[in-house]
Amino acid sequence: MDDKHAVYQAFYQQYFPFWDELSLQDKQLLCENTVERTFDASQSVHNNLDCTGLFIVHKGKLRLYMLSEDGKEITLYRLTPGEMCMLSASCVLQSITFDVYVDAEEPSECYQISPAAFGDVYERYPTVKIFALEITVERFSSVMWVMQQLVFMSMDKRLAIFLLEETQASGTDRVNMTHEMISRHLGTAREVVTRLLKHFAQDGVLEVTRKGILITDKKKLRKIAY
Amino acid sequence: MDDKHAVYQAFYQQYFPFWDELSLQDKQLLCENTVERTFDASQSVHNNLDCTGLFIVHKGKLRLYMLSEDGKEITLYRLTPGEMCMLSASCVLQSITFDVYVDAEEPSECYQISPAAFGDVYERYPTVKIFALEITVERFSSVMWVMQQLVFMSMDKRLAIFLLEETQASGTDRVNMTHEMISRHLGTAREVVTRLLKHFAQDGVLEVTRKGILITDKKKLRKIAY
């Protein structure tokens, strides 16, 4: 086994709870069918046309989203290091019949396992199947949360939640995104975001600067959100 | 084993692909923890507060939906005879962290297995676990379809799809629902549905009568939908 395989091994052992159950051959099968992939920020990782395989994030962040025919996007969830994307391997999970798109949200490194190799192991080990299905059902929960927001919440509430989640993810009080980017995340028009941010700024919740958004009163923002 | 158990047995054997793998004791465990339930049309089967258990539809139709704080509903999918509701047993599937409501859409009969008994078998048999997870992932696909409609489609398209699906389900050209009922399914206001139906009627697609809606030009309706 070469050096690369040793690196994959160590990584998979850490993140695949079923790893130790696999036979030596099957461990090798997965390592041999792993490719290291590097993505620039905003680069496409997967589009709905192919069964690209399983991605496990090593560094960076992937974003899964739905895309309409006229280019409207809705962010479903993000994947961070150690997390994996089953929806890009929908040919393995045959009960998945919908399409998603995956982009790198920041410069990212992933391990990509071919669908054939993963599908092979998936079919032969119940624990692998259970693991893959369970993480998919977990994502189901995330998507339901997005759906609840979309359907039931007013846009100011959704924007407030989005800003809080972003500051929590970055650990700062800044959200360095353009209004255009935020509007894509929320599936609305840029003008709507700009107008709401203006309202928030007037209420002393935040400041809109050229570099992005600075949250100045998190307590107030939370009040709008929850 | 009494008469009732024999009826459950026959039913479960037909609809649970794992049934023959269970030990005699475990088959008995599930039968002993089965209750026959009868629901009137519109009666509540499950609300988000409890882990009610697993429902398998025997006769009739169940409707799963999301409910907002102010009473807005979105229909996620329906269950017909032989289909089962895992989301009402979310204490068994721990990766499910969202709430749904279930109503009987017409007079219905269901078998209800207690969450404890099903959870017990679920934990001990990988095939039971795989089965339950797989049907949940399938539902994930249905929900994504609803979401795609909600987010990306105009309301006239959604109404047309809804009417087509209803006529397909009933096998007639009639949709005997009030505008109020339709608007609840689509998560919009009654006025919006009334206005759109008027447009459709003017275009010769359908007739709005006191009893409900009669589709007069399915081809045209399909054109709006797809």
Image (cartoon, coloured by chain):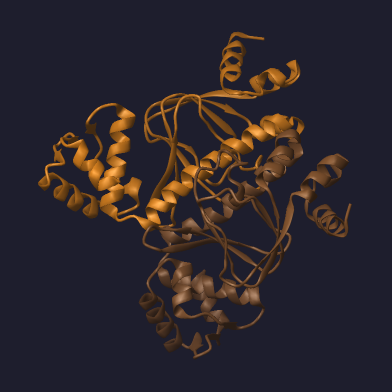
Chain colours: A orange, B brown
Residue drawn at the location 64% of the way across and 82% of the way down: B172
Residue A32 visible, this orientation = no
Numbered circles on residues, count: 0
Residue B153: quadrant of the picture: bottom left
The location of residue B117, given as percent across then percent down, is 72, 43
- Is A96 or B179 nearer to us in this picture? B179
The location of residue A136, given as percent across then percent down, is 57, 40
Position of A83 relative to B103 (above/below): above
| A78 on left or right of B23 | left
Residue A125: quadrant of the picture: top right
The location of residue B224, given as percent across then percent down, is 48, 74
- Is A19 or A59 nearer to us in this picture? A19
Residue B116: quadrant of the picture: top right
The location of residue A142, given as percent across then percent down, is 47, 42
Position of A13 relative to B43 (above/below): above
Residue drawn at the location 52% of the way across and 41% of the way down: A139
Residue A6 visible, this orientation = yes
- Is B156 or A112 nearer to us in this picture? B156
| A116 on left or right of A56 | right
Residue drawn at the location 39% of the way across and 69% of the way down: B188
Residue drawn at the location 34% of the way across and 45% of the way down: A185
- Is B71 or B216 nearer to us in this picture? B71
Where is the N terminus of chain A found, in terms of image quarters?
top right
